[in-house]
Amino acid sequence: MHYVYDLFCILVFPGLIFLSIFGVIAEFIDRKLYARMQNRMGPPWFQPVADFIKLLAKEELIPEEADARMFKVLPVFAVAAVVTAFLYIPLWNTTSLYSFNGDIIVVLYLLTLPTLTFFLAGWYSTSLYATIGAVRTLTQLFAYEVPLFMGILCPAILADSWSLEAIAKFYSEHPWYTLFNLLGFVVSIIAVQGKLERIPFDIPEAETEIVGGTFTEYSGKLLALFRMAIDIELIVCAALLAAVFLPFGLSMAPITIAGLDIEPAVSFLIFLVKILAIIFVMSLIRSIFARLRIDQMIDFCWKYLAPAALVQILISFILKGILIR
Amino acid sequence: MAKVTIPIGPQHPALKEPASFNITLDGEKILDMIVKVGYNHRGIEKACEQRTYIQDMYLIERICGICSHTHSTCFIQAVEEIAGVQMPKRGLYIRTLVAELERIHSHLLWLGVAGHEVGFDTLLMYSWRDREIVMDLLAMLTGNRVNYAINTIGGVRRDITPEQIKTTLAQVDVLEERTKYYIQVATEEITLIERLSKVGTLSHDDAIRLGAVGPTGRASGADIDVRRDDPYAAYADLSFKVCVDNHNDVLGRTIVRVSELMESYKMIRQLLKNIPEGPVVVKVPRKIPAGEALSRYEAPRGEDVHYVKANGTDKPERVRVRAPTLANVQAVAAMLKNGYLADIPIVVAAIDPCFSCTDRMMVSMKDVNASKENVIDWKTLRKYSIDWYRQNRGLDLSKIKISKRW
């Protein structure tokens, strides 16, 4: 029975199927918010699903020059990596499905994998636009990854643990300590914008410059899978930020209605609200900025984001000395 | 990465019209660039010779979908000059009114396109929404959103009513409010300034040497504007400022365009306040006497030039169009020197190119006639033009300094 439960967790809830559906909803919300902020109507609720189905029905074209096997495997790999990352994040209470000391590093590593698959996808496409997109993806990775890691690991320093579960537990016991991590939260949310390749950091897929960027040669089911991976990545990043920086609402007292404990349901709703709030902030960032150039992006990340993250680390160390003895 | 040559165009999502830019890149840096135009040749000049002047006006209006009034007015001015028509004042005022409304719609459109090219889609959505106001005004005044067909030989086809004047004034106030906001965005929004400032620099000397016109030239400090220098239609009666900027880059071109919007609102108010009573059109015979004329017009993109040669029939013998983009496209290569791949779309967009307007048959003098008598050197040409302006327009242009290089 143990294996059945595990399989259910991985494939259905909160694994692949739940994530896909939630990803599609998140994409809709993101697009709708973006549209409303731009004074547009925005798409109907089923638009992302319709896009997905349409892509599934389309012909798959693989360039003759491309490495067909890598070309086909990479989208699956991207989806697998982001779905796996989700399993370690505490969702509606302080316990995640699987946890061990150091899982926060594993989650960050698993979140780096999709970016690497984007790079490889562009590289193996052998098209010029895709290659330039691929090089930009990798260049960008080196710029945002360090501030993102430092930003997300700061709460871990204060909580004195490398496990997401322990971090969540620590902060739900001391909710006010979250405020000390505000700078890290800001740094991370900006860096995540780079990871998800969204404006102002959507340089690898700048449509007016290099057509579709890394995905120029992708079509049909393979492109649909990549799109799904990006949607799920959005959820996972938002969930990770919520778990690390917004840990309130976890492990509340049991709430009973008609003899049923609905505490998990309420906590789950709070979790959804937190994720939507983060998506809202990310949509806002996306709609108020222009796309930066790659050199400006790297300058910005190393000149402002990385030092800000270092300051946050310093704050965390000092506070750790004062508050926790 | 090794050196690569990437093709931008003839078909590319960044381009609204076919044009080809072959770019040699070293990583993200531009090493070399070859510009090719001519994918959109429609044979309009030749077609004009087979149609009557009135038919030509509608054909020429379709050279460009954005500055259609520009081309039709420029052409009709040349025809009216040959025919020696005494133009009714009210007709000229209405012509100028539509011209300025067209400039507003063109500049707002450009602002949106510029936003899109640097990935700032919110600016695109906002400015195109506000552009609807001016499109509606044009539809109300002329009957059409584009290709207004307001001109006719000897005046305009429609009069404007006092209610229309009232509506226009009210809507211009709304547009002015919005434009103030865009000026704020263009001069204060950090990422936008990062992307526009120091990008696509064209020095003052280069602008003069390469013959940049319109906002492209004015953003490099070239103080030229046909509306002031060689007034046509009702511009002589208006007081306005020629917006010149010394940024020399894309930011300067943006600032010139948004400040020109403010000047246009001013001009529209003056036009509607002082519009004289009287007829809007005079009758002109179908046959235009033999003669030739060159007409200049300050299009939203720069100086537009039309040449018409009449032979006494109801059809022109030769029509020649030089759209402003032809004057500006030469500057693009200079602007992109040592630039980045990411800057190509915005730098190309910053001259507000219109390639379908530009594409004409080009026959160089060398091909047609190698004899030397047909080639005029620069000095003779300059002397000729100064004499011509003194005789025909009463303007003395001999004081204008030109670069020593010539």
Image: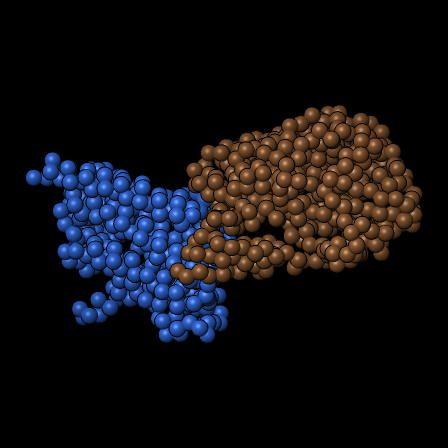
Q: Colour of chain A?
A: blue
Decide which of A12, B387 is in the foreground and name it: B387
Q: In the drawing, does residue B200 fall left or right of residue A164?
A: right
Quarter of the image containing the N terminus of chain A? Answer: bottom left
Image colouring: by chain
Q: Position of residue A77 (x, y in %)?
A: 32, 67
Decide which of A48, A188 is in the foreground and name it: A188
Q: Is residue B346 above or below residue B134?
A: below
Residue pictured at 43% horizontal, 38% vertical: B190
Q: Position of residue B75 (x, y in %)?
A: 79, 44
Residue B96 visible (yes or no): yes
Residue pictured at 46% horizontal, 68% vertical: A220
Decide which of B193, B54 is in the foreground and name it: B193
Q: Position of residue B56 (x, y in %)?
A: 81, 50
Q: Is residue A12 above or below residue B397?
A: below
Quarter of the image containing the C terminus of chain A? Answer: top left
Q: Is residue B237 above or below residue B61?
A: above
State which quadrant residue A88 falls in. bottom left
Q: In the drawing, does residue B57 fall left or right of residue B123?
A: right
Q: Position of residue A318 (x, y in %)?
A: 15, 37
Residue B171 visible (yes or no): no
State which quadrant residue B104 falls in. top right
In the picture, one chain is brown; tell me its letter: B
